[in-house]
Structures are given as structure tokens and as C-alpha cells.
Amino acid sequence: MPISGTPSRAQLVDHLVRTRIAGDVATPRENNLSHYRQLANGVRNFWLGLELGDRWTDEQDVLAVMAERVGVNDDPECRYGQDTIDPELTVDALDRMAARLRKAAEDRQRVLFATGHPGGLLDVHRATAAALRAAGCEIVVIPDGLRTDEGYVMQFADVAVLEHGATLWHTHSGEPMRAILTALEGEGRPLPDLVVADHGWAGYAGQHGVDSVGYADCNDPALFLAESEGTVQVVVPLDDHVVSPRHYDPMTAYLLAAAGLS
């Protein structure tokens, strides 16, 4: 059952492992390695809105970063079975994200929230947006009428999402964030001071020069590579779609408390 209230670090680590947000996660090793290989081979769907050039063409280099920042098995000969996310690394990254959220609150910054994984992370972003608004931040309202080849770019509960066929859409693409930032510039509106997101929404924002923090799974290496290069400020490793979105509530509570927002 979810933890009531704000967990301690030790309680959160235990919760992350029990709910498989971290620890032995559902994503199999072969899927992770396949995604690392496709990123290294230049398949742009796996670049998550970033421009990686020829800097990450060796999948073993990608694996090394993922072992360091996520806690996956660092043995290249381990090719099948269970893979892992180190829950201590998850909480370390939450602490770093909290520091950036605290700065946003102190400076009353403009913050944009977005998710390519609405089935898992929409409410994490919604709750964070509500806390920052209560602290005096401006939560960026996106322009109307935006669309990409995949669908319409819309905003629900302060979080930008992709809508397709009356359904909120899972997407890795950076194009929805490109549409938002391009439209803001076209209207003469300032860009966000901070983007809190995931997938290509976070990657494209960071690539465009906007401070970007977010979440990524162990089979989505691009954001962790961007973090290692400084293009994205913070990336929290986690399974981004566990069996119940309520399992993320203790993590959100810990994040907001660490940021001084609860």
C-alpha cells in the first residue's frame, strides 16, 4: 500500500523497490540493450528530441553511462533477464531536482510541465505544478491550436500532453515541445525558465537551451547522456509506467518536501 504522508529517504527507497519503480524493474535486459544499440546507431526516435551527433556511436559507452547514472548491470555480456535501477540513485536525483525546484520557487520563475507518459507520470507533474503555483511561480500556459504529425498538443491539469483520437498519447518525440517553444517565440512571449518533463519534451527543451529536468526509464538512455553532457540538468531514473500511478505519490511527496514546497 502507498505510504501516507511524506516518507523518509529509507522509507522511500523501500517503497520504490516494493512497487518496482526502482530495484528489479519490469523492463528486461534485452530491451534495454536494444534501445542503447538503436541510439548508438542513430535511430532518432531514441534521441528524445536531442542532437547527439556522433558522440555516442558506441553502445558500450552508452551502457557505461547507464550503469553509472541509473544502476543497470554494467556487464556487457549480461544480455538477458532482469535489469535494475538503483533506488539510491533515484533518490539522489530527486534531491537534485528538488534543489532546482526550490530555486524556481525562490525566484518566482516561469515553469512549463509536459509528459510523454501520461499513463504514469501525469499526476506527478500536476502535483508539482500545483505546488510551484502556490509558491508564486507562473505555470506556463501553452498557445492554442498546436499540432504535430502525431496529434494535437494540449494542456490538462497544467501539463502539456499529446492528444490523438480523443486519447492522451504516449510519445518519445521532441516535436510537441518544439511546437510549444516555437509558438511562444512567435507570439513574443518569453520562454520558460524551467521545463519539468520527460521523454522528448525534456530532451528538446534542453537542446533548445532551456533549463530542463525530468524523469526517464532505464530503456531511455538519451536523457541520461544529455545529463552527463550538461544539456539536461537533472534526470531521475525510474520505471515510468508501473501498475498503478498512485505508487508514485510517495515519491512526489518526498520531492516536494525536499524542495520546501509542501
Image (cartoon, grey):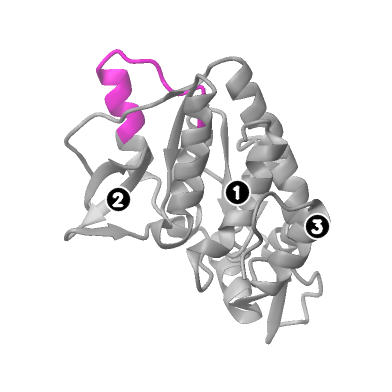
- Looking at marks 1 and 2 on the same chain, the residue that comes earlier in the sequence is marked by 2
Q: Residue at x 59, y 14 (%)?
A: 107
Above or below, 80 against 207 in this view is below
Quarter that holds the C terminus: top right
Q: Is residue 209 magenta?
A: no
Quadrant where the N terminus sits is bottom right
* Residue found at x 63% / y 66%: 21
Comparing 1 with 235, the one in front is 1
> Which range is magenta?
180-195
In this rendering, the label closer to the viewer, 1 or 3: 1
Residue type at tag 2: Leu
For residue 131, say whether it is visible: yes
Kindly identify which residue carries mark 1: 252
Q: Position of residue 88 (x, y in %)?
A: 80, 57
Q: Give how far across and how far down residue 119 sits, in percent.
A: 41, 62
Give the Cα separation between the discs numbered 1 and 3. 16 Å
Q: Is residue 177 left or right of residue 14?
A: left
Q: Secondary structure at mark 1?
A: helix
Q: Is residue 87 visible?
A: no
Looking at the rendered structure, the kind of residue marked 3 is: Glu
> Residue 178 occupies which quadrant of the picture?
top left
What residue lies at 65% left-to-right and 22% top-to-bottom? Answer: 103
For mark 2, what is the residue?
162
